[in-house]
Amino acid sequence: MAMTIQVDSLSGLQAFAAAAEARNFRVAGQALGISSSAVGKAIARLEEQLSVQLFHRTTRTISLTEPGGLFLARVRSLLEGLEEAENEIAHASAKPRGRLRLSLPLTGAVHTRPLAEFMALHPQIELDLDFSDRLVDVIEEGFDAVIRTGEPADSRLKHRKLGRFRWLLVAAPGYLERSGTPKTADDLLEHACLRQRLSTGRVAPWPIAGAPEAIVPATLAASIIDPLLDLALAGAGIGAFPDFMVQSHIGDGVLQVVLEGLLDRRGTWNILWPSGRFQAPKTRAFVDFMVGWAENIFDE
């Protein structure tokens, strides 16, 4: 006789799928927002209902049994279908709402104004922001959308280009009056250079055309780029910044470009989100807003 999974077993199916992906009850619980013991009990009830063992368990690890592996493929299809159905209903009904989890680059100040504008337009959306320079796993870490540089490489994600940018070396006029204006890359050895330190611990390189990175001292290093811009504006030294961060300051005359064309570095900003037949209204609203905002910020 065929076994019928009851509706109230949905939480057990979710727990099973999360545990199968993580190979760990604790990690699965963290992803679902429940305890590891709750995950274990949900799976035990599911196994009892199915009269089959889904996992091999040891004190340290879990692994799928052969029936568990077959069941996982069916459960994944079922859960994906339920998610698409939920998204389809949301797509056709209410205004964008709910928590929107975003991962953004460490150039945080650049996004402050558009995020404030987006919040004003969509007061029913709650923003959960993660600022990082690491390559996050959008799906595994539960992000609704991320903004990153470079060419997208994850086939599980959709993306839209926000714009292109190039890096510039800039300094305040007061600093250049005191310390002189560098004429060649070698001159940077005699200057205060404001550098960004990545999460890996190394200092982000200044890819100087035709010159070794070693010629650029790290007079001051910071883990995020925003205070480096404040220091450059205060006349503390020379910094490297994406053009969209400094173009208004250059236009106002409070920063000057030095060694024009020295940095051999260009990039592309993209917004990425998990692929699927239906895009949640909150994600669609954010993607469309950021693309519209970027049209006025980035050079093509």
Image (tube, rainbow, N blue to C red):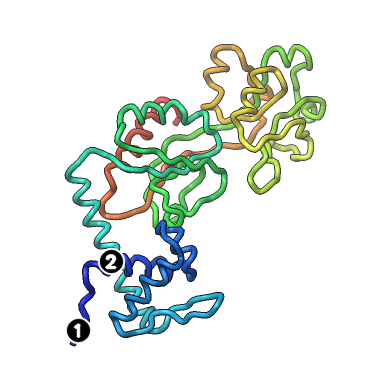
Residue 96's place in the image compared with 77, above or below, is: above
**Residue at 53% across / 75% down in the picture?**
61
Taking depth in this image into account, of 281 and 12 the one nearest to the observer is 12
Residue 14's place in the image compared with 146, above or below, is: below
Q: Position of residue 270 (x, y in %)?
A: 44, 41
Could you tell me the amino acid type at mark 1? Ala
Hey, which quadrant is residue 252 in on the image?
Answer: top right
Q: Which element type, helix, strand or loop, lies under badge 1?
A: loop
User: Which quadrant does the N terminus fall into?
Assistant: bottom left
Residue 226's place in the image compared with 211, above or below, is: above
Q: What residue sits right under mark 1 in the picture?
A: 2
| In this rendering, position of residue 46 left or right of residue 234 | left
In the image, farthest residue toward the bottom = 1
Instruction: Report crowding for label 1: few under 14, some 14 to 19, many 20 or more residues within 10 A (C-alpha).
Output: few
Question: How far is mark 2 from mark 1, CA to CA?
Answer: 18 Å
Could you tell me the amino acid type at mark 2? Leu
Q: What residue sits right under mark 2 in the picture?
A: 10
